[in-house]
Image (tube, grey):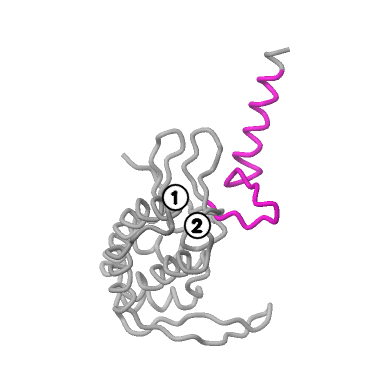
Amino acid sequence: MSATAQPLFLGSHAAVDFLNTAFSPNGKHIETIPDGRALLEWMAGAALLEESQAAKLTRRLGAKALDGAAQEARKLREWARPWLERWRAAPDDDYEAEIAALNRLLARTAWHDEVVVTKEGAKLVERVHGNDPDALLGLIASQIAALITKEDASLIRSCAGSGCTLWFLDRTKSRRRLFCSAAACGNRAKVAAFRERQRAS
């Protein structure tokens, strides 16, 4: 049985954060997008939607359609995870079937860029067209497409923390990042190493 929790934004890329919407610390499955409302909240947190867009989509689509979109998003995630796991290990292999499936999803989606002025200044955001939940999946698919076309597969890594299943894109200059979070898994590893040294001495 799955538990629910707030999403984590530790992956340094929206596509990686999407994979991390389900994780299993020490074997306990955690789901962070159990329904449509949670999906929109995650997309807003990942900067794929403005909060005002999410509110409009909630009114426009309704709970049933959004719950259906969340279900499809979970299917997309579980389809993408093993593919991206293979891709990061062997990026030059042939992924024709997976890319064709991704392109089909992208083709069902319509959005446009729009400049939005905020307190922090002007920024470019993607606006979803229409009332179709497929547009939400397309925005996520566009992040997966960006990951495989613009990022170095060798820098997508699994957290070295004991029992942690989260992924991250290593954007550090040294390319030596080991943990999803220095404050969480990194700190636990330091404590464990300290205790081990104490036992050894």
Which region shows up in magenta? 168-197
Q: Position of residue 27 (x, y in %)?
A: 40, 34
Task: Give above or below for 98 relative to 179.
Answer: below
17 or 29: which is nearer to us? Answer: 17
Q: Position of residue 161 (x, y in %)?
A: 56, 37
**In the drawing, does residue 87 fall left or right of residue 51?**
left
Q: Residue sitting at 71 percent across and 16 percent down?
A: 198
Q: Earlier in the sequence, mark 2 or mark 1?
A: 1
> Is 110 within the magenta?
no
Instruction: Specify few, some or many for label 2: CA neighbours under 10 Å numbering under 14, 14-19, or 20 or more.
Output: many
Q: Which residue is mark 2?
A: 153
Quadrant in which the C terminus appears = top right
Q: CA distance from mark 2 to mark 1?
A: 7 Å
Of helix, strand and loop, which one carries label 2? helix
Q: Residue sitting at 46 percent across and 62 percent down?
A: 15
Residues at badges 2 and 1 in contact (C-beta under 8 Å)?
Answer: yes
34 or 159: which is nearer to us? Answer: 159
The amino acid at mark 2 is Ala
Q: Which residue is mark 1?
A: 89
> Is 186 within the magenta?
yes
Quadrant in which the N terminus appears = top left
